Every structure is written in C-alpha cells, then in structure tokens.
Image (spheres, rainbow, N blue to C red):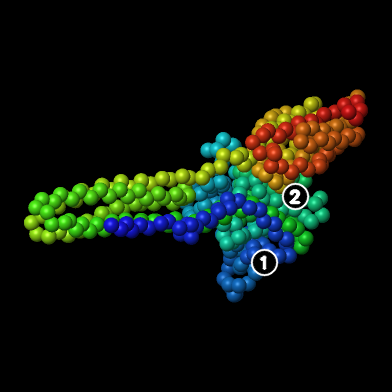
Amino acid sequence: MSIAKNTIRFSDITTTPIKLKYSSSFASSSLASYGITQNKGVNVPAILSGSMLSPNIQNALKYKTIQQLYYKEYISSSLLGTGSAYDPSLQSTAASGSYDNDIRYFPTASGDQIRFFAIPTETFGEQIARKSFAWQSTNNSTYKIIDDGNGNIVDAFNGYEHVGNILYAQGIVTVVNSNYLSALSDNSFTFSVSIIPTPSVSPTPSVTPSITPSITVTPSITPSVTVTPSVTITPSVTITPSVTPTVTVTPSITPSSTPGQSLSPTPTVTPSVTVTPSQSNSPTTANLAWSFSRTGTSGDMSIIINGIVEVYRTSTSTGNYTVNLGDVISVDISTSSCTGLTAYANAQVTGIITDDDCAGSIVTLTSGTYTVQSGDLGNTLTLTCSSYCNNGCI
C-alpha cells in the first residue's frame, strides 16, 4: 500500500506590505520632474483669431475649465444640475462628524485671474490626504498655506486668510485670492502632501492538494476469504492566515483476486487540517491627550505632527489624537492683546514637552520636539497648553 500527498511549501506563499499613507515634499525648482504644473487662468474671451497654442487662448481656456469643473455650482445665478460640474459632496466631511465648510469663491469680473497646481495621479495615487497640504516660502516667514481638511487652503501666517481650494481626489490646488497670485511666481517655495497611494495587491495562491491512496489486495487461495482493508489518512497543513487551502480526498481502490473469492474492501478516509495562524497583539499606537486653556486673551494653539498642523484651537478645549512610533510632536502657542495691569503675555506647555515664553503685550512660543518611542505604544501621552495675560512673567 502506498500514499501520495502534496505539501504546501513556504516558497508557494508570498506577502506584500501595503503602505497606507506617506509624505512627499517638492521644491519649486523640481516640480516639472514630477509632472506637477503651475498654471494661470484669465477671464477673457477665448477668440480663436490665431494659434490655439497662444498664451492668451490657453489662459482663457484654463480659467473656463477650472470654473466649469469645480466652481460652477457655487457661482451666483448658476443652477444646480446644469452643465458638467464636479460633484462637491465628495469634499464634505460632515458624515465623519466635522463641519461641511467647503468655501468656494471664484472671481468672475472681466480680466480677473486665478492660479492653480495640477498634480498627476502617478504622483498622488488615490487621493491627497486631508490636513496634509503645506505650501510655504523658503524663508519660512512670508506665507505658510495649509489645508483645513474641508477642501479650503488658508494662510497660517496671516490670520488664516482664505486663499483657495484643494480637490483631494483630483490633485488640483487653486488660488483665487488676488493677494496670493504672485506666490506661484516665487521661485523659492516648497510644498508637501501626504499621499494615499493606489494599493498593490499580491495574488493569494490557491492550493488544492490531491491525495490518492492505492491499495492492492492479493488473498491466499482459501474457500472463503474476506478482506477488510482500513486506510487512515491524516494530512497536517500549517499555513499563514492569508492562505485558505482546499483539500480534496479521492480514494481509488483497485482490489485484485482470483475468481470465486469474496472481497469486501472498506477504506476509511479521515482528512484532518490544522490551521495555526500567527498573530501579534502588541500595541502599535499611542494616545496623545491634549488640553488648551486661554484666559482673557487673544491666543491660539497648534499641535504639529511631523511638520503638519493636526490640531488648531483658539478657545479653551481638550481632545485626543492617535500617534505612531517615530512621530515628531511640537507645539506653537500665541498670546496677544495683553494691556493694563496684566500687560505681560505668557505662553506655556507641560507634559511630554515642557517649555514657556513671556513678553510684553504679545508672545509666540515655538516649543522643542518630542519623538514617540516604542515604550510609549499602548500608553497615553499628555500635553497641557496655556495662553494668558499676567502682571509679570510666570
């Protein structure tokens, strides 16, 4: 009697990690190498009196394209559902609990201009991650334009003035505020985004082992012979959780005897499959519990993770934020409008970062940084931030 079986080999199994989000930075001098274009649109008639490639016609067509695709439903006297306009509901975050505050302003006077970045899908993948866009001058003081997670871009250095919009799934960043049109002409700026790539899926191998026992019975010559062979087959297969084997057992029994004999083969087939997945329950994140207290002043707080503002508050509040191993955390706190008997502006942070600053009337604290360690995972980190006026530096 012989038994044939197939064995799953480790070489038959492949795994490919999928990176869910990563950040990229681009200098103004290298945008073209990534396919990123800077474009100008002008509200002038597109009169075909010359070449279609003339700058005037190209600028007019770009203006009309951005207006039609992304702003048509927001312009006064336009009717919803008319024309080929982009569906604005894709920008909304109301379903996840935040405000539906996608502000769309578009200049329509004769001669008005716009600017926009066009980022190819080969660069940003499925879409640009919310609250990840940052565009600033290389001197780090003229402007810092970020997105607020609702599709708006604002200048964090100038009172969060509305600059334009970002279309996350289309890779389009528009500038419609005339005060910022010259920013794209600046040859020394950088911008960065967190990119959600198109996932890469590795095929899961389908393994179908075939087990075929072969039995040959040769009884001795006896007037009455009864043969009852018993076959027990117990294959043991251990696989990783991503592989689901299908075991098919097809016994084939071919008895052989001399004429006149009685044969009663009764095979018993008992396949047994043991699946032992390997799992890890180690924590992979930590909780950042933050609070901000503002007492009788004008002030604000920004919590910055890996160079991007993730939490911004202008009034007393508390909250939590999930951080990962290696994340770099820092805090900016501003205090202003301190006068009279309490003319000293104070800004302070304690917890995983301890820092403070004080000055007359107005002060801005830019703290040191803290990097999340392996020992922090599964635990709660704290940041306590304060903005207040006092009769001296505390």
Q: Residue at x 55, y 54 (%)?
A: 17
Amino acid bearing label 1: Ala
Q: Quadrant of residue 300?
A: top right
**Residue 255 seen:** no
The alpha-carbon separation of the residues under discs 2 and 1 comes to 22 Å
Q: Give the camera-side residue of 46 and 182.
A: 182
Q: Which mark is residue 32?
A: 1
Measured as percent of width and height from the top left, residue 5 is found at 35, 57
Tag 2 secondary structure: strand
Residue at image mark 2: 144
Q: Are marks 2 and 1 in contact (CB under 8 Å)?
A: no
Q: Give the camera-side residue of 43 and 348.
A: 348
Residue 369 vs residue 374: left or right? Answer: right
Q: Quadrant of residue 182?
A: bottom right
Amino acid bearing label 2: Lys
Q: Which mark is residue 22?
A: none
Q: Quadrant of residue 190?
A: bottom right
| Lower sequence index among marks 2 and 1 | 1
Measured as percent of width and height from the top left, residue 145 is found at 72, 49
Q: Residues within 10 Å of mark 2 (few under 14, many from 20)?
A: many
Residue 242 vs residue 105: left or right? Answer: left
Q: Residue at x 87, y 36 (%)?
A: 357
Residue 233 vs residue 145: left or right? Answer: left
Q: Residue at x 48, y 54 (%)?
A: 83
Q: Which quarter shows the C terminus? A: top right
Q: Which quarter shows the N terminus? A: bottom left
Q: Residue at x 23, y 50 (%)?
A: 229
